[in-house]
Amino acid sequence: MKRARPTGALLHHPREKMAQVSLHRARTTIVDAEAAAEDLLQQLGSAQPKLVVFFSDRDRDQVALNRAIRKRLAAGVRVVGATSAGEVDNEGFHTGSVVLSALSGDFEVGIGLGAGLSHDAVEAGARAVSHACDELGIRPHQLDSRRHVGLVIDDGFRYKKEELLLGVLDRNQSLILVGGGASDSNDSRQSAILHVDGEVATDAAIVALIQTDAPWAALRSHWYQPTGDTVRITKVDDTATRILEIDGKPAAKRYADILGVTPDDLEFGKPNGFAARPLAMKVGREHFIRAPWKVMDDGSILCANLLQEDSDLELMRMSDIVESTRRFFEEEVPQRVKSPQAALLFHCAGRAWFAESMGKTPALAKTFASAPPAVGLHCHFEIFSGFHINTTLTALVFGAND
C-alpha cells in the first residue's frame, strides 16, 4: 500500500549521492563581545564550518559582537544572525545569552540582505533572493526544490512577512522557505537586529539559500487539533489586519460567544481565549495557525496576519503542549530526515509566553533535548513554506546519507 505523505513537513528526497550536513553548537552568557566570541569559538573546537548561524540577546552591543565573531572565523565562512526574545538549544530556553551554530558538510550557501522592509517589503524580498541566487551562480527560476531551501529571517517588528514572501517567491513559487522574525525580549523597545557577514542591519530581511544533496526537511509543529468548525471573516478594516465582523456579527462578541467566554477573556495569553482556541487556514491537509492577537476598544479583533473578507478559517483546539512537542522531536523529525544531525529552530515567542502562563515552560524546554543538535530563538512570528504563521515551531533539519 502506498503510504500517504505526512502533514507538517516539506521533504527533500535525496539522490543516491553521499552527502551530509552537521552542526556543532555553543552558548555563552559572557557580556563582553570579545570574551563572548572567544568563548563561543573555543567551544566549537576543531569544527570547520561553512556557515555560522547565531542568535543573541538584544541588549548586547551587536556591532561589537558581529566584529568579534567575524574576525575569529576563517576567510570564506559565512555568517547569519539575529536578535531574539530568548535563545534556544538542546539544553532548553535561555535569556541574556548567545547561541551559535557551526554548520559543516556537503552544501553551498548564497546569502542576500533585503533592506527597506518597511518601505517596500516585496522589493526587499526580491532583492534578497536575487542576490543569494547570484552567489550560487543560479537564477531564481532555476532553483530546484529538491536541492535548494531558503532560510528567511526578517525584522519581525516591521510586520511585513506576507509582502516579503511575495517578493521572495515571485520568480519561483516552488521554493521551500522556513524561518521567523528577529525579535527582542524588551516588549516596550521592540527593536530587532540582523547580521549578514560583517553587516549589522535593521528594517531588513535575510534570505540564505542552501544547496545540498543531503537529506533535509522544512518542518513545523504546533499543539492544536482541528475541530471541523469554521467561521467566516465577513468584514475587515482597510489595513486588512483587524476583523470587524465574523459570520456577519461584531467580531469579538461572535468569537467570545463561540468559545463560551466574554470578550475580556479572549486576548492572546489568557487561558480560555485566542491562544487556547485559535484560528487556522486550511491548505490541503495542513492547518496554518493564524491566532488572533487582542480585542480592540471598538469590538474588533487585531491580528498579526493579513486577512481577506469572505474567507473561511477553522477553529482549533489545544492539545497537550509538552507531549506534542516531544513527539515532534522524537518521532516526526527522524521519520522525515534520514540520520538527522542539524536543526535550526524558530520557536514562536507567543508560544513560549503562553507555555509560561500555563506553568509548562520547564517541561516544554526539556523536550528540546530530543532534537538533533540545534540552536534557535524565540522569534516574532514564523515562516513556513510561503506562509506567515504564528504560535508554531518551525524547523530546518539536515541529515546524512549513510
Image (spheres, rainbow, N blue to C red):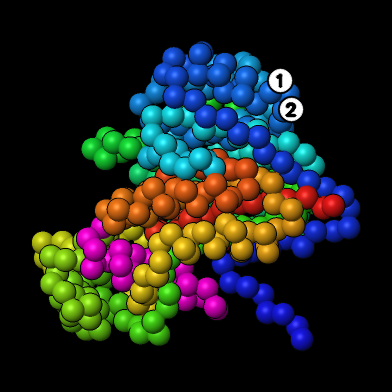
**Under tag 1, what secondary structure?**
loop
Q: Residue at x 35, y 26 (%)?
A: 59
Magenta stretch mostly in which secondary structure? loop
How busy is the neighbourhood of tag 1: few (under 14 within 10 Å), some, or many (20 plus)?
A: few
Task: Using the rendered view, name the quadrant where residue 90 is placed.
Answer: top right
Give the number of marks.
Answer: 2
Which mark is first along the chain, 2 or 1?
Answer: 2
Q: Is residue 253 above or below residue 385?
A: below
Q: Residue at x 15, y 61 (%)?
A: 296
Where does residue 228 sit, x and y in percent of width and height?
A: 40, 85
**Which mark, by number, is residue 74?**
1
Q: Is residue 273 left or right of residue 322?
A: left
**Which mark, by number, is residue 313?**
none
Instruction: Based on the picture, tell me whether residue 101 belongs to the magenta stretch.
Output: no
Q: Residue at x 36, y 70 (%)?
A: 318
Where does residue 38 sit, x and y in percent of width and height?
A: 57, 16
Pointers 1 and 2 in contact (C-beta within 8 Å): yes
Report the magenta residues as a range: 269-292
Q: Is residue 179 above or below residue 242?
A: above
Real-space Cα distance between discs 1 and 2?
Answer: 8 Å
* Near-viewer residue (165 or 33): 33
> Residue 122: in sight, yes or no?
no
**Which mark, by number, is residue 48?**
2
Instruction: Based on the picture, tell me whether residue 281 belongs to the magenta stretch.
Output: yes
Amino acid on which the number 2 mark rests in the picture: Gln
Q: Is residue 169 above or below residue 207?
A: below
Where does residue 27 sit, x and y in percent of width and height?
A: 52, 29
Q: Is residue 95 left or right of residue 263?
A: right
Q: Quadrant of the N terminus?
A: bottom right
How busy is the neighbourhood of tag 2: few (under 14 within 10 Å), some, or many (20 plus)?
A: some
